[in-house]
């Protein structure tokens, strides 16, 4: 027996009475508080909306049982509840805050999609109503900032005009004759939502009575999703919270930068330019320091019997980023092996000239077999990080002993 869907004709219905047709134990349900035992309840009629068409299900109660999920299974609405219902007649109560939020988002989506298609030729191919933001996927060329703002502005203009939102019923052919936005091939009588002068769209979801109840539409951003463009947006109470959070964030940024919120972007651009210049300066200074230190270490290191140098050193207070340019600079010298470590972080960097005779990758594996850590590299250059930074001197000494055999 098909469940009579009360929300089809009255999305504002919160309380209703119904007859219980079935109540059976179901698979345990994973809720926010953990896995709970649940029952599947089927009623002769219901105001609860099941997850469908991108819109999440309603929540609420059937008598004292909490409705944890609502599913659409063929022609029946299945209510997942946390208590067995033993009576034949029940009173249902839909959680209104969640329902009205979903009504605002879904009607807002219809209006926004209509503006994108009518004004810019960008049809909506999918819709998702999330817990914080909603999305529509548009097909066509990338929407520019002007297109995003234009669609938002046009949709909000229709909201401010407080246009009626009504339910229409008819066959696919009848709706097509009325100019439905998206034609469907289903047979029989279909339900459609009409926004006066803006949109007519087949839909089984819940909607507000006038566009004014959407409150406001705020388009957030646009990203590429495979062949389409995903638009994030929020309506009503969500748009208010989102805009408030955005301004609070901007104000906080302004306070950190010691400027007015409207000046934050200019100050950040200036800071980014200065940062890039400082980064280049530091990189140049670091290279110059590496060259000077490498020259000093080369002079202070005794040439071995084989005519080569093995330079082993552990640094404690220096910036660990100095290891890489120093090792690279030392390895520019033929027949030279650099075995460097950093005491605080446990980092190791081993390097040698391309004409070197040792296999540093093999040498590192031998070191890590003695002093555990993770790393790797090539025959002439390796990097690693020890599990215990306090053992970095031991690791470097082990490497030195192996390299001088």
Image (spheres, grey):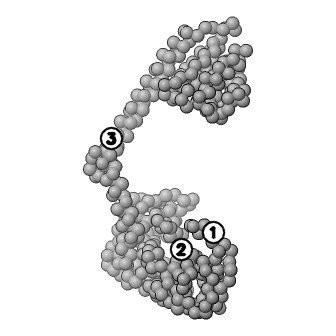
Position in image of residue 191 (x %, y %): 52, 86
Give the quadrant of the N terminus: bottom right
Which residue shows up at 51% across the image and 29% down it?
321
Q: Secondary structure at mark 3?
A: helix
Q: Which mark is residue 56?
A: 2
Of residues 60 and 218, which is closer to you in this image? 60
Query: For the residues carrying marks 2 and 1, which lies nearer the camera in this image?
Result: 1
Q: Vertically, is 258 above or below 55?
A: above
CB atoms of marks 2 and 1 within 8 Å: no
Which residue shows up at 65% across the image and 85% down it?
23
Give the quadrant of the C terminus: top right
- The residue labelled by disc 1 is 35
Of residues 233 and 7, which is closer to you in this image? 7
Ranked by sequence position, the earlier of labels 2 and 1 is: 1
| Disc 1 crowd, CA 10 A, few/some/many (<14, 14-19, 20+) | few
Position in image of residue 386 (x %, y %): 62, 32
Q: Which mark is residue 312?
A: none
How far is the residue under mark 3 from the one under mark 1? 53 Å
Of residues 178 and 383, which is closer to you in this image? 383
Q: Secondary structure at mark 1?
A: strand
Q: Quadrant of residue 280?
A: top left
Position in image of residue 89 (x %, y %): 58, 93
Q: Secondary structure at mark 2?
A: loop
Q: Is residue 325 visible?
A: no
How far is the residue under mark 2 from the one under mark 3? 45 Å
Query: For the residues carrying marks 3 and 1, which lies nearer the camera in this image?
Result: 1
Which residue shows up at 49% across the image and 82% down it?
94
Q: Which mark is residue 270?
A: 3
Query: For the residues carrying marks 2 and 3, which lies nearer the camera in this image?
Result: 2
Ranked by sequence position, the earlier of labels 3 and 1 is: 1
Ranked by sequence position, the earlier of labels 2 and 3 is: 2
Which residue shows up at 55% across the image and 78% down it?
66
């Amino acid at each position: 027996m098909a469940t009579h869907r009360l929300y089809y004709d009255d999305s504002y219905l919160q309380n209703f009475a119904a007859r219980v047709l079935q109540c059976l134990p179901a698979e345990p349900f994973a809720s926010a508080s953990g896995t709970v035992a649940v029952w599947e309840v089927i009623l002769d009629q219901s105001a609860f909306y099941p997850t469908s068409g991108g819109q999440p299900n309603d929540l609420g109660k059937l008598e004292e049982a909490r409705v944890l999920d609502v599913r659409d299974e063929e022609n029946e609405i299945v209510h997942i509840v946390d208590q067995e219902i033993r009576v034949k007649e029940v009173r249902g109560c839909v959680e209104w805050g969640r329902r009205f939020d979903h009504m605002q988002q879904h009607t807002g989506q219809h209006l926004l999609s209509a503006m994108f298609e009518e004004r810019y030729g960008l049809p909506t191919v999918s819709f998702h109503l999330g817990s914080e933001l909603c999305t529509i996927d548009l097909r066509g060329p990338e929407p520019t900032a002007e297109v995003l703002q234009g669609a938002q502005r046009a949709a909000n203009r229709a909201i401010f005009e407080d246009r009626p939102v009504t339910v229409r019923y008819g066959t696919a052919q009848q709706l097509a004759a009325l100019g439905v936005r998206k034609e469907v091939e289903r047979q029989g009588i279909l339900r459609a939502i009409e926004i006066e002068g803006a949109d007519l769209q087949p839909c089984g979801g819940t909607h507000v009575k006038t566009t004014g109840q959407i409150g406001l539409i705020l388009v957030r951003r646009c990203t590429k999703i495979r062949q389409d463009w995903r638009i994030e947006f929020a309506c009503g109470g969500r748009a208010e919270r989102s805009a408030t959070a955005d301004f609070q964030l901007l104000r906080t940024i302004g306070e950190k930068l010691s400027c007015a919120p409207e000046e934050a972007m200019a100050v950040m651009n200036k800071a980014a330019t200065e940062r890039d210049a400082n980064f280049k300066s530091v990189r140049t200074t670091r290279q110059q320091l590496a060259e000077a230190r490498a020259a000093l270490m080369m002079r202070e290191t005794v040439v071995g019997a084989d005519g080569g140098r093995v330079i082993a050193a552990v640094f404690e207070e220096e910036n660990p980023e100095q290891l890489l340019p120093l090792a690279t600079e030392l390895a520019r010298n033929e027949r030279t092996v650099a075995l460097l470590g950093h005491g605080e972080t446990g980092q190791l960097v081993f390097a040698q000239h391309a004409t070197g005779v040792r296999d540093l990758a093999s040498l590192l594996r031998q070191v890590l077999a003695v002093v555990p850590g993770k790393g790797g590299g090539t025959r002439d250059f390796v990097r690693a990080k020890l599990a215990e930074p306090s053992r970095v001197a031991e690791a470097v000494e082990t490497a030195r002993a192996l390299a001088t055999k």
